[in-house]
Amino acid sequence: MLNPQLNRNGELVHLLSIDGLPREVLLKILDTAAPFTEVAEREVKKIPLLRGKSVFNLFFEPSTRTRTTFEIAAKRLSADVINLNVGASSQSKGETLLDTVDNLSAMQADMFVVRHASSGAPYLIAQHLSATGRAHIHVINAGDGRHAHPTQGLLDMYTIRHYKRDFTRLTVAIVGDILHSRVARSQIDALTILGVPEIRMIAPPTLLPAEVGKLGVRVFHDMRLGLRDADVVMMLRLQNERMQGALLPSPQEYFKTYGLTPEKLALARPDAIVMHPGPMNRGVEIDSAVADGPRAVILPQVTFGIAVRMAVMSMLAGA
Amino acid sequence: MKLPDAQNLIDRLAGQMRPDVVKETALVGILTGGMWIAERLHAMLGIEAPLGVIDISFYRDDYGRRGLHRDPKPSSMPFDVAGRPIVIVDDILYTGRTIRAALNELFDYGRPARVDLAVLVDRGGRELPICPRYCAQALDLDRSQNLQLEKDAQGRLSLRLIDHA
């Protein structure tokens, strides 16, 4: 099947999910992101690549951090950024998703950055645009339902490569609410494509997806066993807002079993790094002593995230 | 056509630049060929400021038609640009579009006291009002000809002419 994310020359035209992207494309994005990190060090933190382009941040679900980093990335590329909090406007008046997209396209949009509570919404938009002769408009998935959050996955890979260089010797442990996490799905896809030999999943059975057996990962319910000799520990946020029913006894109980404390982190390799996509629930999935400790690379993740998003936007707009 | 020896041209370029070098002078080489020359000039002229490097990929005027350069590299300006005399160094000066992009990028780091341009070869064919202050060799080449600076495994630089006619 033709991958809707790539054009005939194999160039990235939309970023919808990491699943299905060739390894070379992933590596190309990571390589391209590196020079963008330097732009932030200049007196004028702006380069002219996307001058005159309009980037619409189309957020059907609330988000501060992701929306802001996309906005900063687009602005550093000199694009005009329009933020739409759609949940609060047209949709509540009954407009359909594709009508919203058509209206914004008529305002000469060049790129949509889409977050939506329904898995597949960005795909639907990309398909609609190409079916209606507007294939020049690019779509970036900024998180759809439980499906994917590809730029988060990519910035995580950038961070891992920055600290660990070689993916093919690593043991990576992903800890927490994997069931509800689109971040985890994008991370697993990316780690697999980049050749990480051991991917571990540490979670209670109630927070693991039913299809976990097909993901090619090792599952641990005991955090102490799962963390042993890990090079990278990727924490996930406990997604309170997505919890339905009694999946967990209490946040305190969860912290006791699956919270990352200095004492549990000591079981990982001495040079292990700790990552978190944010926002953190201190005292629920992560202890402050770890979050603020020397092994945490949580703030560099945020900084790298801007460079990775700049790279993706430049590659799409130039394809 | 017999091409001049690149090392001789660098010596000549250094000779032209030497009288104007002051304590604050900084060199900025354009990746990749310009940086090779700038590295040598930096040592020959005893420049105090560390060498600056510019990759113009993010400032090209043909991004809209050709997309992002295949392999962008980070620029690096390891000195304070503001108030400093700066010499941009490139290997071959042709349309002038690369220099335009480099000037735009340089000014995003600060406001230099002055900016000059040093090139190994000026091959003509300018499309912008740009003129080098230092130039080791002028050559009159046809549009179908492509002049390149190359570096071999021993680090020796040489000019190469490719005829597309």
Image (cartoon, coloured by chain):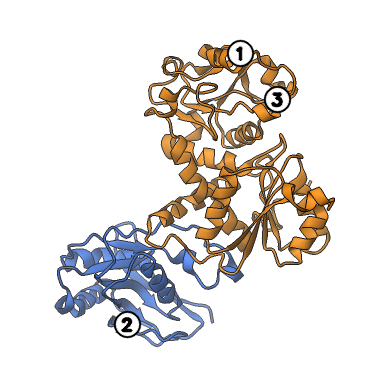
Mark closer to the observer (2, 3): 3
Distance of label 2 from label 1 (alpha carbons): 68 Å
The chain holding disc 3 is A
Q: Earlier in the sequence, mark 1 or mark 3?
A: 1
Please give the residue where the numbered disc 2 appears in the rendered image: B132
- Could you say which chain is coloured orange in the image? A
* Residue A258 against residue A41 in the figure, above or below: above
- Quadrant of the drawing holding the N terminus of chain B: bottom left
Local secondary structure at mark 2 = loop
Please give the residue where the numbered disc 1 appears in the rendered image: A221
CB under 8 Å between discs 2 and 1: no
Q: Residues within 10 Å of mark 3 (few under 14, many from 20)?
A: some
Q: Is residue A218 left or right of residue A225?
A: right
Please give the residue where the numbered disc 3 appears in the rendered image: A243
Residue kind at label 2, given as amino acid type = Pro
Local secondary structure at mark 3 = loop
- Quadrant of the drawing holding the C terminus of chain B: bottom right
